[in-house]
Image (cartoon, helix red, strand yellow):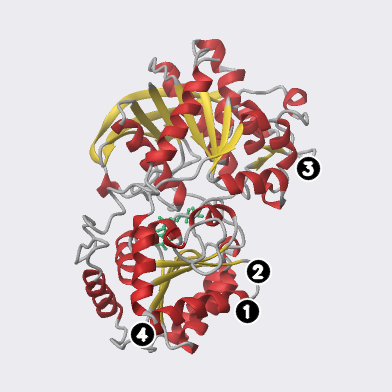
Amino acid sequence: MYIVQIASECAPVIKAGGLGDVVYGLSRELEVRGHAVEIVLPKYDCMRYDHIWGLHVAYENLMVPWYDGAVCCTVHCGWVHGRLCFFIEPHSEDNFFNRGCYYGALDDHLRFAFFSKAALEFLQQTNKRPDIIHCHDWQTGLVPVLLFEIYKYHGMEYQRVCYTIHNFKHQGIAGTNVLWATGLNNESYYFQYDRLQDNFNPFALNFMKGGIVYANFVTTVSPHHAWEAHYGEFGYGLGHTLDTHQGKFTGILNGIDYEVWNPEIDRYIPYNYTQDDLSEKLKNKKALRERLWLSHDDKPLICYIGRLDDQKGVHLVHHAIYYAMHRNAQFVLLGSATEPGINNWFWHEKGFLDQNPDVHLELGFNEELSHLIYAGADMIVVPSNYEPCGLTQVISLRYGTVPIVRGVGGLVNTVFDRDYDQLHQPEERNGYVFYQTDQQALESAMDRAIGLWQHYPEEFQQLAKQGMECDYSWNHPGTDYLQIYDFIRHR
Ligand code: ADP
């Protein structure tokens, strides 16, 4: 099969979170199985150019219709750790992708509407006719809309779209100008409840809703979150739309790429190790402590890696730092906040805790350091308010770092409580789960984990090993996605 991924991220060249990991990992899995995969991305000024090999101009003067005129684009091509990627660079005063950041601009809806249009225009003009176009999140929600309303009539009638939602909270809300910019025009047609009209604001268009309505198949990133989004509050207003389209909606658990996330071969950690020899993991703990100026006492080391925002249960993350100290454990945090209030809060905490030999807060995005933390920590906390899939707990399991998670979304599908899980045999359990959002719930799960580490070290090691044995590679999800592709291709 010939598959084109259209996305706003692809790790490690463009990565703000799990979306980047998924686009890269799934593409690699599909290629390993013999399929042809290409990835279309924006050419951001701030992406990691050091992760692109052989970057060159692939196509010049790609004229992308935009409002009454057209924007001239250059398409660059290069390999990101073996994946063939095309980067779209528009030349216009809007400077869509030269903003020093991936997201967060006031005109994001126009930036990504333009990207979606340009990606299809590129396929159309270069005669690329993939069997499947796989697009992701609100940024590319307009791809199936544009394909089936415009490009279908320009030689792309056989292309089929799989649309994956990684985060329902951000849906891409816009006004009529997007219709005029992209050439969809016809306001009264799109502003209908069964098309792109937002479910709550009748004067707004919703990109993600467009994706759900128009795509041939819609997935989200774990089975439990598919249920939550459909029947619970985590569809953020799209539950009814999912219900209408339930016949083409499912949840597929994300995998992780075991070539990238694998303590046996990881190039970013000083000591590679397997589950048969966890003493090498201990050496990474020592290296991590040395790097972050932490003391070398006989204490468990707990970490948090991830965005610092409301979704991630940031108040509980904060509480975990102090509770770890209270329980004679160490804490390392690697995270970044886009919201100024949270950012200031954690910078203040960092200043306050800077000389503390048991705590280190690293504020910013640091891919390399994240590997060392996964390898060096004993436990990770993931106290999310909601979590579509969550990759940090899955990566931690691979590194023998025991997850302490809140039982929501994909965390439910991946972490099974050592003491209380009813559905898995003791030897299949791999971490600790709590359910409420209050501090006591977190504390009780941390207590159990720290208690095991302190008083039953061999059993703690056994738990870590059981986590390492879980298979959260792309093996199963790769098969699931291929089944979906096959299904929609023949319709
Ligand atoms: P998200 O909601 O952000 O997509 P996920 O758990 O699905 O959360 O994926 C997070 C990914 O981003 C993981 O690969 C994690 O290691 C990485 N990550 C998050 N924050 C940072 C950071 N500050 N520095 C390095 N990597 C990070």
Image height check: is 42 above or below 51? Answer: above
Tell me if label 1 and label 2 are in contact, CB under 8 Å.
yes
Q: CA distance from mark 1 to mark 2?
A: 8 Å
Q: How far across and how far down the image is residue 329, in percent?
A: 42, 84
Q: What is the three-letter code of the residue carrying label 3?
A: Asn
**Residues at circles 4 and 2 in contact by the CB criterion of under 8 Å:** no
Spatial separation of the CA atoms under disc 3 and disc 1:
38 Å
Q: Badge 1 is on which residue?
A: 440
Gap between marks 3 and 4, in whole Å?
52 Å
Q: Secondary structure at mark 1?
A: helix
**Distance in Å between CA atoms under marks 2 and 3:** 32 Å
**Disc 1: CA contacts within 10 A as few (<14), some (14-19) or many (>=20):** few
Mark 2 highlights which residue? 436
Q: Is label 3 or label 4 in front?
A: 4
At x 22%, y 63%, the residue is 273
Residue under numbered circle 4: 299
Callout in the foreground (3, 1): 1
Q: CA distance from mark 4 to mark 2?
A: 27 Å
**Does residue 142 appear in the picture of this structure?**
yes
Q: Earlier in the sequence, mark 3 or mark 4?
A: 3
N-term-proximal mark, 2 vs 3: 3
Name the residue type under label 2: Gln
Point out residue 209 in the picture as x, y percentages from the top left corner.
66, 36
Mark 3 touching mark 1, by CB under 8 A? no
